[in-house]
Image (cartoon, helix red, strand yellow):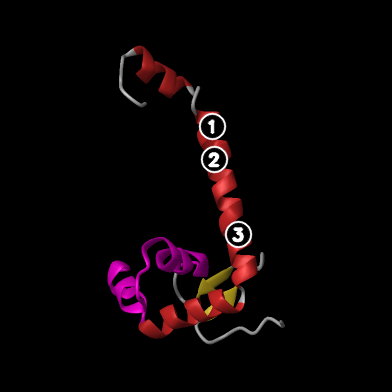
Amino acid sequence: MSATITNHIRLDKNGVPWIDQTNTKVVEIALDKLAHGWSPEEIAYQHYGQLSLAQIHAALSYYYDHEHEMHAVIEKQIEDFEKRRTASLDSPGRLKLKALGTKNP
């Protein structure tokens, strides 16, 4: 499928899709839908009215048109998070909290 950019969506120099004139990535809207099951109206509400329904629908449209690539991005983010979380288990701050007897530092 060829990449078609819809209104309200732009790709940055790294190919990351963003909602035009915002600091919101398309993947963030996709995650709102996937993780919470939110409707476009709920997504607009949760983003404090800073996104129009047209912008949200455009982001979801882009997501569905590029679902395979978007899921790869999400999986990479999860892997990166797990690596950082694992690396932080023995951080100086966490060890200090353990020494103080803090639960689940």
Relative to 32, residue 87 above or below: above
What secondary structure prevails in the magenta region? Answer: helix
Q: Which residue is mark 2?
A: 82
Residue identifier under label 1: 86
Q: Amino acid at mark 2?
A: Glu
Label 2 and label 3: CA atoms lie apart by: 14 Å
Residue drawn at the location 60% of the way across and 59% of the way down: 73
Residue 42: x and y in percent read 30, 73
Which of the pair 1/87 is nearer the observer?
1
Residue 44, by quadrant, is bottom left
Residue identifier under label 3: 73
Above or below for 43 versus 78: below
Residue 86 coordinates in the image, percent (x, y)? 54, 32
Cβ atoms under marks 1 and 2 closer than 8 Å? yes
In the image, residue 54 lies in the stretch drawn in magenta: no
- Secondary structure category for the residue under label 2: helix
| Distance from Cα at disc 1 to Cα at disc 2 | 6 Å
Q: Position of residue 84 (x, y in %)?
A: 54, 37
The span from disc 1 to disc 3 (Cα, nearest Å) is 20 Å
Residue ID at (44%, 69%)? 29
Q: Which residues are magenta?
A: 24-52
Indicate the secondary structure of the residue bearing disc 1.
Answer: helix
Residue 101 visible in this rendered orientation of the protein: yes
Residue type marked 1:
Thr
Residue plotted at (42% across, 68% down): 33
